[in-house]
């Protein structure tokens, strides 16, 4: 029964968190966004004391339930391990804990966190690793499927679906996500939860706490015949059947061993109850052999439910996405101007705040309707979001990224406040401006500026009828990038955004 409850809860959490990264409209975040905010590392970085305290108490009470139910990367490994062990009657075996590796990785992780080396933190964080896999590898497949439905619907004059652009946001991030997926699949396929119990820093922290949990899986030595069946079914490799010991720091409370034991020698109960059983003050429970065929059927049903939930994307096609403004097809391929300072979204407060709190899970990137956010290629901020205006601009009425960020890297911001937050300012490049290079009227930047920070003036002060060029009021510019995005100059625009280290209210 406990295993059934764990499977149902883990399946729901995994499917819903995956859908948060796949849903490019951001619709599901209104209902299930809290699942991203209860992840351990984002809650710590966001200083969400309530969530951190809840997870610590949960671990103290029931062991590493977080790793087997809430963490999407942990559940993903279970899915791969389940597929990998098909056909293998006894796939796993006990192995001693590699404590030096576990705590060594944790020390490096904490050091990187304190030093602000966000790229290293992002590589090791489990929730962020799964987010990058879902965003870079799974979401394009999801979007292609959506486009197929849109094409088929259009053939029958139905517009329940709309076509979306599928593009690679960052090659380095894509390669990192692909390498992470390959490593996880190989480890989980061969040895189950190897990543969780040797590399994952969150698993190491919760493992240390779970040593003192109230509820634990224990072995009744009077019933155990040392057959080793439980150890060979333990994907955490934490059951030493010969010595009748279970490493509580590595046990993720998956309950697989409870259903496997044919002698009913394993129990998941409070510590004080197991002590009473050991001293013989309580009567032993009657032996109950496990129905293995029923167990397999239940596991298969859980996987079918997960697959069915993933297909539920059809309902989100009814939502309307904010479409990109413009209408000027590029004549030449656009090249991005090299910026001295990167631009981070409104609500990030500063580049420093972004570096200290962002885990590079890329949830904000997946929901950005204007295609402005993309992963950074800088080594110190690798995979963290930054703004680029090649495919759109940051609309003043959009606050999607601040609504979904679970780590406090992008603080919640209202639509009214966003229009007054200056994240950067426009810079005019005279040599690229079309009125001067081609001798024709333009003014596209001025017409689309939402804050009226650009004014068109005569290029020749002595001739009021001369072609007009833009003049930028940097005090009014908020750095939204509308002028840069809509500038028709190619290959480089005549106007581009330069970021600010610290944001300010104008």
Image: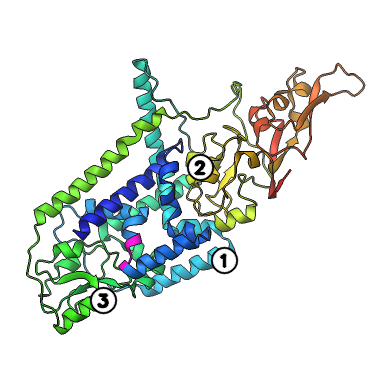
- For the point 35% across and 56% down, the residue is 70
Q: Measured from the top left, where is residue 16 in percent x and y?
A: 36, 45
Q: Is residue 287 above or below residue 361?
A: below
Estimate the spatial distance between the alpha carbons at disc 3 and disc 2, rounded to whole Å. 45 Å
- For the point 22% across and 48% down, the residue is 302
- Mark nearer the N terminus (3 vs 1): 1
- Mark nearer the N terminus (3 vs 2): 3
Secondary element at tag 3: helix
Chain part drawn in magenta: 62-66
In this figure, which residue is indicated by the disc labeled 3? 271
Estimate the spatial distance between the alpha carbons at disc 3 and disc 1, rounded to whole Å. 37 Å
Estimate the spatial distance between the alpha carbons at disc 2 and disc 1, rounded to whole Å. 25 Å
Q: Is residue 454 above or below residue 285?
A: above
Disc 3 vs disc 2: which is toward the camera?
A: 3
Q: Is residue 380 visible?
A: no
Q: Is residue 77 above or below residue 471?
A: below
Judge by depth and name the residue closer to the eye, 275 or 186.
Answer: 275
In this figure, which residue is indicated by the disc labeled 2? 365
Q: Does 327 sit left or right of 91 as displayed?
A: right
In this figure, which residue is indicated by the disc labeled 1? 114
Placement of the N terminus among the 4 image quadrants: bottom left
Q: Measured from the top left, where is residue 180 in percent x and y?
A: 40, 52
């Amino acid at each position: 029964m406990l295993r059934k409850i764990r499977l149902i809860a883990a399946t729901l959490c995994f499917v819903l968190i995956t859908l948060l990264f796949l849903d490019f409209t951001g619709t599901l975040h209104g209902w299930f966004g809290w699942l991203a905010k209860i992840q351990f590392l984002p809650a710590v970085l966001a200083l969400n004391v309530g969530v951190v305290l809840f997870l610590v108490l949960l671990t103290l009470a029931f062991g590493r339930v977080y790793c087997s139910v809430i963490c999407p990367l942990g559940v993903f490994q279970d899915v791969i391990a389940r597929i990998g062990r098909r056909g293998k009657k006894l796939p796993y075996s006990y192995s001693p804990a590699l404590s030096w590796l576990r705590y060594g990785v944790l020390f490096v992780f904490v050091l990187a966190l304190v030093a602000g080396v966000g790229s290293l933190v992002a590589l090791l964080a489990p929730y962020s690793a799964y987010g990058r896999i879902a965003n870079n590898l799974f979401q394009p497949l999801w979007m292609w499927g959506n486009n197929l439905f849109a094409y088929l619907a259009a053939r029958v004059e139905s517009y329940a679906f709309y076509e979306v652009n599928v593009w690679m946001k960052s090659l380095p991030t894509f390669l990192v996500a692909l390498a992470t997926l390959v490593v996880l699949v190989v480890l989980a396929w061969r040895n189950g939860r190897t990543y969780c119990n040797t590399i994952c820093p969150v698993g190491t922290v919760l493992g240390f706490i779970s040593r003192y949990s109230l509820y634990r899986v224990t072995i009744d030595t009077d019933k155990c015949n040392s057959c080793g069946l439980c150890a060979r079914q333990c994907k955490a490799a934490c059951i030493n059947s010969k010595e009748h010991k279970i490493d509580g720091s590595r046990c993720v409370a998956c309950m697989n061993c409870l259903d496997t034991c044919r002698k009913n020698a394993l129990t998941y109960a409070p510590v004080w109850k197991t002590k009473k059983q050991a001293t013989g003050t309580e009567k032993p429970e009657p032996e109950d052999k496990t129905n293995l065929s029923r167990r397999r059927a239940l596991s298969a049903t859980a996987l079918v439910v997960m697959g069915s939930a993933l297909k539920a994307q059809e309902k989100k096609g009814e939502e309307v996405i904010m479409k990109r403004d413009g209408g000027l097809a590029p004549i030449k391929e656009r090249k991005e101007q090299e910026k001295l300072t990167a631009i981070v979204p409104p609500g990030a407060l500063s580049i420093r705040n972004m570096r200290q709190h962002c885990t590079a899970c890329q949830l904000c990137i997946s929901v950005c309707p204007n295609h402005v956010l993309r992963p950074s290629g800088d080594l110190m901020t690798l995979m963290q979001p930054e703004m680029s205006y090649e495919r759109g601009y940051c609309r003043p009425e959009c606050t999607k990224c601040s609504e979904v960020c679970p780590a406090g890297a992008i603080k919640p911001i209202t639509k009214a406040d966003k229009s007054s937050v200056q994240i950067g300012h426009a810079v005019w490049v005279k040599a690229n401006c079309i009125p001067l290079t081609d001798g024709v009227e333009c003014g596209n930047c001025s017409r689309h500026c939402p804050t009226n920070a650009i004014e068109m003036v005569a290029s020749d002060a002595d001739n009021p009828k001369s072609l007009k060029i833009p003049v930028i009021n940097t005090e009014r510019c908020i750095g939204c990038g509308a002028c840069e995005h809509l500038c028709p100059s190619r290959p480089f625009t005549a106007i581009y955004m330069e970021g600010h280290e610290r944001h300010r209210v104008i």
